[in-house]
Structures are given as C-alpha cells and as structure tokens.
Amino acid sequence: MSMLYQSQRAMRAKRQEAMRRGVIAILDIGSYKTSCLVLRFDSSDDLRPSEEVGAMAGQSNFRVIGAATTRSRGVKFGEIDTVQETERAIRTAVQAAQKMANMRVDHVIVSFSGARPRSYGLVGETSLQTGTVTECDVARALAACDVPDIGEGREVLHAQPVNFALDHRSGLKDPRGHVGNRLSADMHMLTIEAHAIETLLHCVKRCDLELAGVASSPYVAGVSSLVEDEQELGAACIDLGGGTTGVSIFIKKHMIYADTVRMGGDHVTSDISQGLQIPAADAERIKTRFGGLVATGMDDRERIELESDTGDWEHDRRSISRAELIGVMRPRVEEILEEVRATLEDAGFDHLPSQRIVLTGGGSQIPGLDQLASRILGNQVRLGRPLRVQGLPQSACGPAFSACVGLALFAAYPQDEWWDFEVPADRYPARSLRRAVKWFRDNW
Amino acid sequence: MRQIIRRRGDAPRDPAPSRWSYRAQRLWLTPLFRSVLRVGIPSFLIAGAVGLYASDPANIQRLQDSVAEIRRSVEDRPEFRVNLMAIEGATPVLAEEIRATLALDFPTSSFDLDLPRLRARVEEIRAVDTAELRVRSGGELAVIVTERRPAMVWQAREGLWVVDAGGERVAPLLARPRLVDLPVISGDGANDAAEEAMALFAVARPLGDRLRGLVRMGERRWDVVLEDGPRILLPADQPMRALEEVLALHDAQELLDRDVARVDMRDGTRTVLQLTPQAMAELRRMRATDITGDRNG
C-alpha cells in the first residue's frame, strides 16, 4: 500500500507540474479508438465567465487546443494486447494532436476501461483527538480503513472518500470544523489488474511521455455525461464502448461503484461479420450506416448490398434487408444490456433513491437503443452526450468522446483521493526521521 | 501465426509515425530547440564566416580596393562632372580674384568639390560679403557673390582703406582710385564705429562739400573736421543730437562761418566755443571800445 501511495503521489506531483506549465495531454485508450486531447490551462481573461458566457459548469479554466483520434490497434477488451501496435496508435494520436496544438506535451493522463475493475466500499473510524475535526483527523480516519484482500496482482486505481459520518450524523461532505467524538469515513476503492497499468506505463514511456495520472474510463465517462442533479441524486452511466461496456454509479457527486461488462460494439460487429459472412471492416461499415435495434415494416423493404470481390458472382451480389441486420444485432445488444442489468443489481442500484440511467459511448448511437434499454433497464433511461468544453472540435463532441471529455474534466478538477491527504504520523515506520518531523509539524 | 518480425519490403502502409519521426517532431516543437535552430545557428554561421574572411588583412585590402574602385567609377561618370565655373554678382576684378583663390582644375567630379570649404575660402576675400556655391545641372559650378559696397575711406595708420558701411575693409584705396570721392574717416578704431559714422554723415549732409571727414578720437568719440571752419567736438553718447544742435546754431546764427576755432559739444549742458586768436583780440578790442564809449557816453 505504501508503494501505491508513493507512486500515486508522484503522479499527482507530475500533474501539478504540468498544470504549472499550462499544458497537459489527455489520452483515452479504447478498444475501438485512441483519442488524444491537448489541454491548455491558463488564467487569461477571455476564459473567465462574463455577462453573456457562464462558467460552463466550472470547466472554463482550460481549453482544448489539440485533438486527434485514431483507430486503436492492439487493444482488446479495453486492455493493451499488443504493445507495439498500441504504442503506434498512441504516437499517431499524440503527434496529430501536438501538431494541431503546435505545442509539445510531456505529461499525459490516461484512461482505459478494461482490466476487470472491482469496487470495494471501505469504512474507517477514528476518535478525534481535539474536539473539532481537522484535516489530520480525516487522514487518520481514511488510514484506519481496513483494506480487504484485493487479490494477487491487483492495484488500486481510485480510492475516494465518498461520505463522512461524525457520531450519529452521516452524509457530511466536508467534516472539517465539525465538533464530535468519532469520525468515520466511507471510502470507495477501485482496483484493477496490475499488469494493465504496468503495460500502460511501458507504452507511455516508449512514447517519451510521462504518466501524470490514470483514471478509469467508466468513472470519467460518468463525470462528463451525467448532469449535476443526476450525479447528486443518483444515476448510473453506461458507457457502451468498443470492447467493453463500463458501468458506473454516482450519488452525491461521488462514484460509489464501477464495473465493466466485457462486451461491446466490437462483438456486435463480429456477430454481423460471422452471421453475414462479410469482412469485419464491411461489417463495421454496415453496422454504423444501417444498424438498428427496433425493426419496423419499412425495414423489410430496405435492401443492403453486401458487395465483395471474391469472383464468385452469387457471393458477390448478395443483399440483405435491414430487418435481417437488426435481427443479427439485437440479440447481442440485449445480451450486453442484460449483463449491465445484472451488474447494476449486484451493485444494489435498486436501492438508490433515483434510478436514472444514462447511456453514452460510441455504442449508444445505435438507433433504437433507448427503447431497448428502457425495456431492459427500466424507464428512466436517456442518451447522454458529453459536456461541451471550449475548443473541442465538432468531430469530437459525440457520445463516443464522453470518456475523453470526462478525463479532461478530471484533469482540471481532480477528486480528492486517499493519497491526497497527508499520512498520519503513526503510519510511518517507528524510528523514522520523517515521523519525528511529522509529529513536530502536527503538534507545534 | 502472424508474422511478428518485420522484414524490409513486406511492411504494409502504416499511418503511425515511426519512433524517430515522432521524436523529431517533438524535438521540433520544443521552443528552445526551435529558436536555436532558426536563429542561433544561422547567425553563428554568418558571424563565423565573416570573421574568418576578415581575419586575413589581404582580404580587407582587396575589399577596400574594390569599394574604392566602384566609388571612383561612379564619381567619374559624366553626369557628375563639373566643367566650368560661373561667377555672378562680382565685378570682373573680383571675379578674377575669386578664380585665382579657388584655383580649381576643371573638369573635376562634383564629389571632389568640398563646397562649404570653397565657400569659406571665397568669403575670406575682403571684397566679398557673402557667397553661395552650388553645382548646377550641365556641369556648372555657380558662385553667387554679394560684394561689399564701398561706403567710406578710412585713413588708417597702415594706409588708406575703402570700407563698407559696416566698417569691413573692402580694398586699399590705391587699388580703387575711382572711389576718392567717398567720405573720409580716420583715427584708430574708426572702422569699428562705422555705422555711427554713416549716421553722422547722413546728419551732416547740409554741410555739403565743407565736410572734410570724421576723426575718431581715443576710439571713443568723433570730431567733425570742416574745410574752412571750426572743428566740432562731439560727445561719445548721442553724437547725432549734438551735431544737429550745431547745425541748428549754424542755421540760426551762421556759427560755422564765424571766426571760431572749435565748437565743443562734449559737455551736454552747454556749448563751448573756442575763438581764433584774431577773433579773441577783436573781441577784447570791441569790449574795450564799448567800455570807453560808455565812459564817453
């Protein structure tokens, strides 16, 4: 845990240094596409909220100055599969974004969806030394959380305090300054497989970049596509990606659960490819162009040519109706949504006060998905698009970029994590000089 | 299994930049590197090349020679040649003198003429008041001269000089024998007060030919010398008014025609007359007869 603490703090220091320099890159490594945004942070007056232009949900202190998207290669289920190919994809995206920004970026914040995230809810309790709660007490309460066995070869990705309780009062956002006896903190911890992060670190290092932060893609997708009251009252964000479908649950502006379903748009494409005996590239094109989930009588009459160049006349001149295509796609999408429902049930989503579900990600652009999803997941389903941020090109405003935009927001307004608090003195080794220094600083 | 090792020639088209081109682009986007490559290295190379060339004195000599040659070839063009000198506003005698002074060797290039220096040399000639030199089109050097106007003859210790109204010497009188009729001044420093002298001559015009001239006394005040009459001693300040008073006395009582040796105006409050010895004797005799007459009467 101490190693993790050190490495996460090092990443935070790099992020702060990049903020000081004013430029940082955002890299979303997905199974279908790798996109890179270059953000410029500055305090110039043209970005300040004025009479006509509002604060844009508080994200007005940065501006996207470079954006590039490339086809991912070598990423499967949101995890890096072929390192060299992924590295090339990262290089392509970063180079194009740098060229657009006309600026070199050295620090990059990465999000990815795979590596089997697992959520844990932790509770830590401490008695207050003085009457009022100080930041030191918060740190001690967080440090007192009993960490469950997260398993061999797993790493903590997020550990965010989500709730504080003081004596019998629960639901405190910020306990500092309150008077009481016992402070307990609820923490949400997200763990992933360690090899994914190590591979990612290797890839980023091979691209001469420095990793300034890692975020889970379901989390950042929720940050950008859930509106404020949804985050406050409780909602789930379903990020339908290429290789995985991310599920994250928010309440009181904190993520309390995240998981992924290891199925996504690529599986729909491979179903089409297998079912219609066409290459995967053609299947992808047909899916995006003619795909749908709810068949009507009109769809029987709409023919889709399946052109190929094998030399066999019969094979090359096939055509199917759109209803047939829908018939291929729908079972797979239903399967994905069933899995999502199972995940939500495991997470206890039914017990939340609000049952809002927001569908985002590239897969949410399938026509008819909202009808199908409301049939499977419940009534309160809507399609979500990411927040508008300044300077983002029109081509990167679609729901496929919600993780990307969310990562930019995450970079600008990071959530307090467990390692952002100072380590309490009694956690240091017994004879350490730093412990002595810490003790002096706390008591004098 | 898919081929892992990539061999030359069988690589499909890859949109991704190679590692080296990626690094090169990042390097090129580095501000310091960019400024060094675009400004630092070219300026260093230029400075180095110039320094290397200039380190050899033979190169500098050659450079200076070629510059001088180019300059010469431009100066020698017929457009810049000056062929003759035209002198305006000077008498032939003065014109000859100016030519002799300048001693220019025509044809010459207009770049070789140092006009301010030539002008200073022309203006050093006494008879020249101001001079203006300019090169006109057609290769003509025009010298426009304003001569000094002879106003007076000054009888100085070293000889007779013709001077202008400002007191500047124009020429010795011997060189200009025709100017004998000018009014005459004499005495040390007479030319310094030439303007006052001119004013006095203007006041003394009613005296006509009787006026011989003015004598500067002690470089301070003037004496008026008449042909046949008394010497008029003028004060140092306001000599014109004093002379006018004398002339008024002359108009009223023909003072200057009488037998008076000196009219002394130096004391502003009174006029002192010095009689000639005969007049003095006559006066005494007349007074004696007056007394005897009275006694008789």
Image: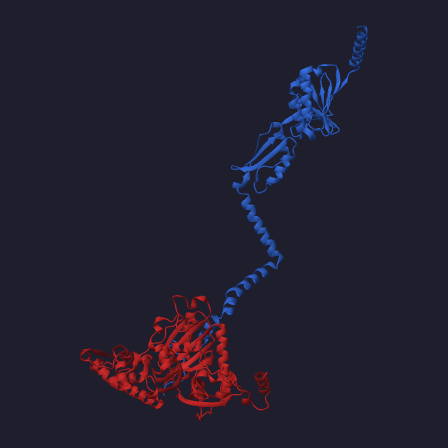
Question: Residue at the location (26% across, 86% down)?
Answer: A331
Tell me where residue A158 sits by quadrant.
Answer: bottom left
Q: Quadrant of the C terminus of chain A?
A: bottom right
Letter of the chain shown red in the rendering: A
Colouring chosen for the image of the structure: by chain
Q: Nearer the viewer, residue A181 or A171?
A: A181
Residue A81 seen in the current view: no
Question: Residue at the location (52% across, 69% down)?
Answer: B32
Shown colour of chain B: blue
Where is residue B263 drawn, in percent x and y?
73, 20
Q: Nearer the viewer, residue B170 or B46?
A: B170
* Left or right relative to B284: residue A60: left
Q: Nearer the viewer, residue B107 or B153?
A: B153
Tell me where residue B198 sits by quadrant.
Answer: top right
Where is residue B280 drawn, in percent x and y?
79, 14
Q: Quick check: B125 above or below B281?
A: below
Tell me where residue B255 sits by quadrant.
Answer: top right
